[in-house]
Image (cartoon, rainbow, N blue to C red):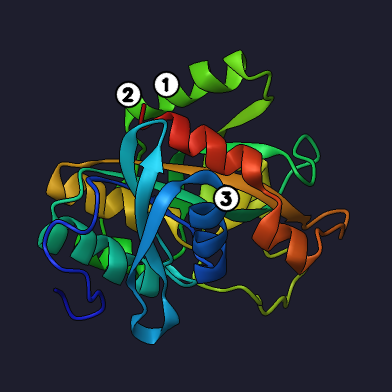
Amino acid sequence: MSIHLEAKPGEIADFVLLPGDPLRAKHIAENLLENAVCYNNVRGMLGFTGYYQGRRVSVQGTGMGLPSHMIYVNELIVDYGVKTLIRVGTCGGLIEEIKVRDLVMGISASTDSAIVSKTFSGMTFAPTASFRLAQKAAENAKNRGLDLKVGNILSSDLFYHETVNGDSYAVWRRHSTLAVEMESAGLYLLAARFGVEALALLTVSDHLITGEHVPAEERQLNFTQMSELALSLAV
């Protein structure tokens, strides 16, 4: 048992999916896993362990933002020995080539967060996905007929940016950043620190150019292609 997870030793698998929304964790457990059992309800941040095609896997909600996400990732790795962590979340499209409902894989995660820069005393560290997981995800997506968009993403500390002189994301677009979300850089940072594997798979829920967005209920319940692709990495 850790501070924020009430699971007993052995109740969490070594392969964990990480949705931000705990209700999405519940949906994945109930619809994609077999014999799923809830191991955590602390702060309503639901966690479940079950089986996918015979492989024991867990799914754990993490909340929004790097600080919340990194609390759960840290405890999963340090206190429960998790070796593979797959973020399954939503993101906002930043460039015209990315469309709402597209599936994005963050091969790297830039960030405006001080969490990363302070760790390295102001020097630049590039949080990066596991090559093995990224390669397998790309292969599995191709076999499933999925158009997986791959590139750099932005993990931002802010959901609502104060815009003074125009476009808050112009410099990120100028450097071909596909999408913005709020967690993956922290996940990749901790994966590098503790020597485990991590990957971020994201579904575009809204677009910062067109203003198009997906309803909240669909974000919670219907982004199954992303979750199924993530689970395919376990088998």
Which comes before the other along the chain, label 3 or label 1?
3
Q: Is residue 77 left or right of residue 232?
A: left
Among the 4 quarters of the image, the one containing residue 27:
bottom right
Residues at badges 2 and 1 in contact (C-beta under 8 Å)? yes
Instruction: From the image, tell me which residue sits under label 1.
Output: 136
For numbered disc 3, what is the local secondary structure? helix
Q: Residue at x 59, y 40 (%)?
A: 226
Rendered location of residue 119, percent (x, y): 21, 63
Under mark 1, the amino acid is: Lys
Instruction: From the image, tell me which residue sits under label 2.
Output: 132
Query: Of circles 3 and 2, which is in front?
Result: 3
Rendered location of residue 194, percent (x, y): 14, 49
For numbered disc 1, what is the local secondary structure? helix
Q: Is residue 109 left or right of residue 228?
A: left
Q: Is residue 59 left or right of residue 203?
A: left
Label 1 CA crowd tier, 10 Å (few <14, some 14–19, many 20+) = some
When the figure is inspected, residue 229 is found, relative to residue 94, above or below; the finding is above
Q: Residue at x 32, y 23 (%)?
A: 132
Under mark 3, the amino acid is: Asn
40 or 212, nearer to the observer: 40
For numbered disc 2, what is the local secondary structure? helix
Q: How many marks?
A: 3
Which comes before the other along the chain, label 3 or label 2?
3
What quarter of the picture does the N terminus occupy? bottom left
Among the 4 quarters of the image, the one containing residue 75:
bottom left
Rendered location of residue 231, percent (x, y): 45, 37
